[in-house]
Amino acid sequence: MAENIKVPTMAEFMAEGKQPEVLFWVGCSGSFDDRAKKITKAFVRLLNKAKVDFAVLGTEESCTGDPAKRAGNEFLYQMQAAGNIEVLNGYEIKKIVTTCPHCFNIIKNEYPGLGGNYEVMHHTTFLKSLLEEGRLTVEGGKFKGKRITFHDPCYLGRGNGIYEAPRDLLRKLEVELVEMKRCKKDAMCCGAGGAQMFKEPEPGKEDVNVARTEQAIDVKPEVIAAGCPFCNTMMTDGVKAKNREDNIAVMDIAEMIATAEDL
């Protein structure tokens, strides 16, 4: 039976002559990858619970151009970014939230150079603001007392200096938060930022996602918390490579909150 989740589009808002409080930029992974779609659904459930007036672009959302830019194809990046900016500016978007640190980073920091100026928030920062405004409550539920470690996404942490918002949310879940030896500004990339997710790794002693997962396993977590759909995939594959999928889960913080709230 299909899950019934309310996800309005910008076109629907415009047809009614309304503007949403915030645009939810879903991203390619959150739109098309089966595992990441679960993160998207969890975040939407939280938005609905907090009664956030939000919309998505739907079929009008295209790739941000981040993969093209990181691969050195500036021409393709500018084409993709210009198309998105034209759509966003056409809808007079002021505020954007996204569950993907890659989308967050490029829209926040590089779209302004092409005429796209918006307030952009990562979903952990946005969820924390909803808590502070009293629009969302978070309780431990099934995660209370569980041993959790957080893997810092490169484009959220070292790229934009956001370390505490995801950890503050985990503390609200009343978990036992344990830090890896390499965390925050010293955190190690899972490999997705270096495009290892999309290709075979170079010859070497060990895959980078497995090495990062071993650092997480060293602190004996029950859950590895993530704030990026790409990190989620890389760490999940790392847990499988170490044959620990039966006792270590990898979850996005939005999924943890939605699960704790039984949404």
Image (cartoon, rainbow, N blue to C red):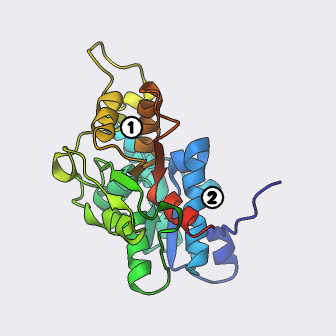
Corner quadrant of residue 170:
bottom left
Give the spatial CA distance, label 1 vs label 2: 21 Å
**Front-most of 136 and 74?**
136
Image quarter hosting the N terminus: bottom right
Q: Which amino acid does label 1 sit on?
A: Ala
**Front-most of 140 and 16?**
140
Q: Mark 2 points at which residue?
A: 58
Q: Mark 1 points at which residue?
A: 68
Q: Residue furthest right?
A: 1
Q: Residue at x 37, y 36 (%)?
A: 192
Residue 96 coordinates in the image, percent (x, y): 44, 68
Q: Which residue is drawn at 41% across and 27% down?
A: 242
User: Viewed as shown, does residue 251 lie left or right of 45?
Assistant: left
Q: Residues within 10 Å of mark 2 (few under 14, many from 20)?
A: some
Circles 1 and 2: CB atoms closer than 8 Å? no
Q: Which amino acid does label 2 sit on?
A: Gly
Q: Which residue is drawn at 40% across and 52% down?
A: 225
Q: Residue furthest front?
A: 145
- Vertical order, 139 against 157 (above or below): below
User: Viewed as shown, does residue 140 lie left or right of 171?
Assistant: right
User: Viewed as shown, does residue 184 lie left or right of 213?
Assistant: left
Corner quadrant of residue 129:
bottom left
Q: How crowded is mark 1: few (under 14 residues within 10 Å), some or many (20 or more)?
A: some
**Sequence order check: which comes first, mark 1 or mark 2?**
2
User: Viewed as shown, does residue 2 lie left or right of 53?
Assistant: right
